[in-house]
Amino acid sequence: MNLETIKREWDENGYVVVPQLMDAARTEEIRSICDRVLEQWISESTDAGRAANSTNMAFLTEPRFFQKNPESLKLFLNFIADEKILSIIAHILQAEPLFHNTQYFFNPASDTRGGDWHRDQQFGAPDEETEKVRMNRTVGIHAHIAFLPDDNLEFVTGSHARWDTPEELTIRKGLSGAKKNSSEMPNAHKIHLNAGDAVFFSAWGIHRGNYVAGVPRRTFDAIYGTPPDWEIHWYTPPPTCFLQKDLLDGLTPQAQNFFGRFIETYKDRWLRGNYDA
């Protein structure tokens, strides 16, 4: 699939599936890092049972996860800034992407449930007008990369480029007694991924996950986007490992440039303690 086809599908649908973005060896290599981080995260939780029933964990780049193996952090960062990933996102944005955060989705231990429908920009927004401004002035992109077959993501086709219909808004906001996790969301499309496949989808489009106990799921998610618009900016990611001295040493030139811009964007805020958890 070439970049022009990817851009055309994104513009039309708000997502695009890229088969076999990663080969089997790279899939296993990065999965082993993420699985080790996940194990540590669950074991360190004050309530390990509750953590094991979570839908995902975030901030995989926290330095504590790599204290015993700092080289795996460099490998992980080089993956997040991989040329194949960044070239796709840059072509979608028509600009250089900025890093935002990481997540790892896994199957809950025992609690099967459907997730709530949402647009990422709704979180922390006091009203719909704020949501719309965020939607119109910035772009957020998830790179969702499956390490095992995964059909748990649902996306409302084309919703990245428009506001909700009345029926969509009723479900997303839980109005008039509607369930926010209703299976009756119009125009919802279930996205099927095989191991090594990726879907790039709009964080601003209407989407949700489904979480099924007992069915193994291991899907890495990195979030990228446009630089923050400080007039409407509502979230500053935490620094995780990015204030470490000499962090960029040993990374590929592309990764050095990519994460260097991320650090430059947020460093002053991080040093002031002005960021979100």
Image (cartoon, rainbow, N blue to C red):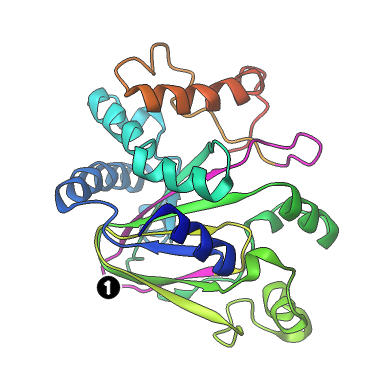
Q: Tell how many labels.
A: 1
Q: Which residues are magenta?
A: 208-234
Q: Nearer the viewer, residue 149 or 18?
A: 18
Residue pictured at 58% horizontal, 82% vertical: 187
Q: At label 1, which amino acid type do we have?
A: Gly
Residue 95 percent across, percent down from the top left: 58, 39
Q: Is 176 located above or below residue 222 in the figure?
A: below
Q: Position of residue 125 (x, y in %)?
A: 77, 54
Specify few, some or many for label 1: CA neighbours under 10 Å numbering under 14, 14-19, or 20 or more.
Answer: few
Q: Secondary structure at mark 1?
A: loop
Residue displayed at 38% across by 39% down: 80
Q: Quadrant of residue 202?
A: bottom right
Outermost residue, left side: 25
Quadrant into which the N terminus falls: bottom left
Specify whether residue 89 is in view. Answer: yes
How far from the left and from the top, in percent, is residue 227?
A: 64, 35
Image location (x, y in percent) of residue 57: 42, 50
Residue, disc 1: 214
**Membership of 220 in magenta stretch:** yes
Residue at 50% in and 43% down: 90
The furthest residue to the top:
245
Along the line of sight, the residue nearer the viewer: 203 or 92: 92
User: Is residue 150 shown left or right of residue 27?
Assistant: right
Is residue 14 covered in magenta? no
Q: Which quarter of the image is occupied by the C terminus? A: top right
Q: Is residue 269 above or below residue 199?
A: above
Q: Where, by quadrant of the figure, is residue 157 drawn?
A: bottom right
Asked if residue 223 can be seen in this view, the reply is: no
Q: Is residue 158 left or right of residue 124?
A: left
